[in-house]
Image (tube, grey):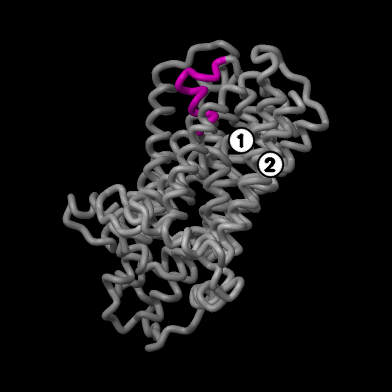
Amino acid sequence: MQNRTVMIAGFLAGFVSALVWVLGTDVFQGLRLWLEATFFGTFVRESTSAFGYPTFIVLHTVGLAVVVGTSTLVALRVLGFASTIPIAPLGRLFPLIWGGFAINLFSGSGLAAATADGQLTNPVFTAKIVFVVIAVTAMFLLQKSLFVDAPEREPTVTRLHRQLAGSMVGLWLLAMVAGRLIAYAGVIVGR
Amino acid sequence: MNFIAELFDMNYAHVHIVLNHFPTVGAAIAFGLLMYSLLRRHAELEEISLVLLMVLALLGIPTFITGAAAESTISVRSDTALVEAHKDAAVIAFVLLALTGTAAWLGLWQSRRFKRVAMWNQVAVCGLSLVTLIAMVWTGTMGGEISHVEIREEGMVIPAEAETGLNGELEAWVLDNAWVWPAGETLHFTGMTMLFGVAVLVNLRLVGLLRSIPFRALHRLLPIAIAGFGISLISGMLLFNANPMRYIAVPTFFLKMFLLVVAAILVLYVTVFDTTWNLRAGDKPPVVARTIGVATTAMWLCVLYFGRMIPFLE
């Protein structure tokens, strides 16, 4: 894995996290309300068609199951669990995982835009996004370092791989807990 | 199960009366078979009784659900105290049956992987299935007395008001503590993700992708799926039990439960049958494996869909 890849990934992760936090400040209330008023935001919030809010929620759940369920198994294998499974073919799971992530990026954007002012000012939401961003970065770096150099050969697992895999699983758990708790922020942080 | 009910012009009480014979009578048959197979050291018969226990545990889910639904059809009665007592017994019997089914599955998994069932597992399945049988007889007898007044003991007095038994306390615990509901939901999602991830990997191999992975290696992952299923089952039942009428009012809830039980074919197929176990690296899966792979993936997606849609279909 090239140093440049790590640097770009790290920079992007920091940038997106900071952006989500900044968008929640008072200065950007106008932008948040504009997001709610966009066609996308209004559609997700108000459409009574078969593609409205419930569908976005369902898509988000399916994407979660695909991304977290599958990538966690890859991480467990990297950590030494089920060591009879060859690692090399697991690289072929990543198109599926990134497909699931694309579904969640799309459905998540829709859900966030629909109630942008409430979501972006919710600290539980901000925390969830930060957890997801770091988890996805760890997943991307794990994929790049394990599979891309020589796709057919069985890769050697190093300490770095195990650290990436372990932090990814932990962050997925945090992201899932925070994600579910967004709806209960009123009870938790008095909102 | 509501579509079956409509087809035969039955209500939930009827469906419950049909289903409840499986875990009760089934537990007796499975326990007898298990004892006989262990005493005669008959490995095949032991395997059959373990499969039976696993299937019974799955059938326990619709039995429990329709039981809660049946209560709504007989609410105008003087013997509700008996119904409450039956529910309390049913909760215990259900949990014991689920534990027995899980232990039985672990036995099947071990016998595949290590060629034999561990001693501790045999002891656990024997003990659990005996306790389950006792709880089932207790629950079933009380259930029988609800619908058959004539078999009640002579002079049996049923109090007019139901006591707050185990079920009531469980319900109050879930509803009175603000953290239990979100925690239960989070666990339900986490368990689902564990199950779904393993199902994706196993089904990809079953439909013919990831062919360079021998199936035996994937077999190692199955306990993660079962643990996930257990987490979702316990958390889901806890939430269901706190407010059954809310879920029963959702027409697709029964469809979700039905699909869930049928989709468990996947677990049975990859645990018990030789076909999957013998798929080495590079082997093409047979048509049956492909069919089960595609069908159960579709079913699990439907389970996810109908589950997540519950709040929108109330």
Disc 1 residue type?
Ser
- Residue B107's x, y, as percent? 62, 38
Provide the residue designation for mark 1.
A71
Q: Quadrant of residue B120?
A: top right
Is A183 in front, or is B255?
A183
- Residue A162's x, y, as percent? 77, 34
Above or below residue A163? Residue B82 is below
Q: Quadrant of residue B96?
A: bottom right
Residue B204 sits inside the magenta stretch: yes
Which residue is found at the position 69% from the left and 40% from the top? Answer: A11
Residue A33 sits inside the magenta stretch: no
Compared across the picture, whether B268 is left or right of A36 comes to: right
- Residue B108's x, y, as percent? 59, 35
Which residue is found at the position 39% from the left and 17% from the top? Answer: B287
Which residue is found at the position 47% from the left and 16% from the top? Answer: B285
Element type at mark 2 = helix
Instruction: Tell me if I can see residue B136 in this picture.
Output: no
Provide the residue designation for mark 2.
A168
Q: Residue furthest right?
A: A159
- Residue B140's x, y, as percent? 42, 63
Compared across the picture, whether B128 is left or right of A108 comes to: right
Above or below residue A8? Residue B134 is below
Disc 2 residue type?
Met
Mark positioned earlier in the residue sequence (2 or 1): 1
Is A165 in front, or is A13?
A13
Is A97 in front, or is B280?
A97
Which residue is found at the position 39% from the left and 86% from the top? Answer: B157
Q: Could you tell me if the residues under marks 2 and 1 are in contact, i.e. CB atoms within 8 Å?
A: yes
* CA neighbours of label 1 inside 10 A, class few (<14), some (14 to 19), many (20+): many
Mark 2 to mark 1: distance in Å? 9 Å
Q: Which chain is indicated by disc 1?
A: A
What residue range appears in magenta?
Answer: B200-211
